[in-house]
Amino acid sequence: MAPDADLLTQLLEQVSRSFYLTLRILPAPVRRQIGLAYLLARTTDTIADTAIIPPEQRLAVLQRLRERILGVHQQPLPLAELVRQQGARAERALLERVEESLSLLNEFSKADQACLREVLRVISSGQELDLARFAGASAQNIIPLRTDAELDDYTYRVAGCVGEFWTRLCRAHLFPEVSLDESALLADAVRFGKGLQLVNVLRDVPGDLRQGRCYLPAEALARVGLSPVDLLSPAVEPRLRPLYDRYLARARDHLEAGWAYTLALPRSAGGRLRLGCAWPILLGVATLKSLAVQNVLDPAQHIKVPRPEVRRILWKTVARYPFRRWWGRLFAQIAAPLQRL
């Protein structure tokens, strides 16, 4: 067994069961690079989310880790206090094993290292921006994003850039000689990532508000006569719904671009790559369907795709894959209830 085997299997499965499904199906030439990118991104996210540590201390550690990832220095990271504050074993292991993750980064080719470092640089910049933006935030002091442009920038930094990374890596390793419209593929890849993150934003509104974070822009809320603090009351959901549905439609449209991206991938790259893209898109659409009919401000609602539906979606993608036209219609069929938005 390779020294990194349990790092990119057991630990990765513990910190993201849903992404691990995608990772396992990916073609071998890109699986370890994408797995490591996710592992290091989750490590930076764990640092950013350790709320008991003051924001300025977390920000300093994040910056040190970003410098390590970029190869600026090799100094040990001051993680002892952050490790002690982790309640979950998996998050604690992420921090305890960060030196192994960083060491693994150096085992890839120079080109792969450059891809990994760039995507992690952008992701960590988004996390650092969030830490600075929401310093002092609480349920009694809710800090919102101001504009749609800030929301779009946030979704790009933490997820849209992953689409670019994923595409460049797969292009280099899986279909380097195939002629295709690369600019269109990259544009759809960015929207793919933004769509997945926007699903998370829309699903997590009640929890984020109670941490003092509002990702629904203040300018947009003001246009419907609401402020961030109003959203703490589930009773105002009918007033929010028209605006919320516009963001649902935006997320759906981004995911539809992600589906176009999936269909544009050359068949020569293999079914594993297309399935690895299809699963998060279709599960994201299924989440949007739940958000379209539930009170999205009620903190008692835990909106997630039921396991039987997850299994049905996965089964459909595998069963229909050999039939190109039938498989290509999957998105439209699953997203049909959202077309009225």
Image: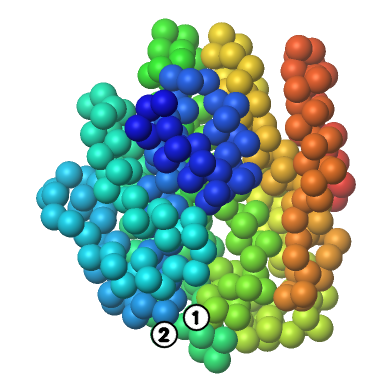
- Look at the image and tell me whether residue 262 can be seen: no
Instruction: Judge from the rendering whether residue 318 lies leftward or rightward of residue 176; answer left or right.
Output: right
Tell me residue 224's x, y (percent). 70, 77
Q: Is residue 11 above or below residue 198?
A: above
Disc 2 to disc 1: CB gap under 8 Å:
yes
Name which residue type carries label 2. Gly
**What residue is drawn where x is 51% and y is 28%?**
184
Residue indicated by mark 1: 143
**What residue is drawn where x is 83% and y is 65%?**
294
Instruction: Judge from the rendering whether residue 72 lies leftward or rightward of residue 247; answer left or right.
Output: left
Instruction: Judge from the rendering whether residue 160 lies leftward or rightward of residue 281; answer left or right.
Output: left
Instruction: Judge from the rendering whether residue 101 lies leftward or rightward of residue 257; answer left or right.
Output: left
Tell me residue 75's x, y (percent). 13, 55
Q: Quadrant of residue 339?
A: top right
Mark closer to the chain start, 2 or 1:
2
Name the element at disc 1: strand
The number of numbered discs placed on residues in the rendered structure image is: 2
For the N terminus, the image quarter is top left
**What residue is drawn where x is 42% and y is 8%?**
177
- Look at the image and tell me whether residue 198 can be seen: yes
Foreground residue among 42 and 59: 42
Q: Residues within 10 Å of mark 2 (few under 14, many from 20)?
A: some
Name the element at disc 2: loop
Tell me residue 238's x, y (percent). 82, 75
**Tag on residue 136?**
2
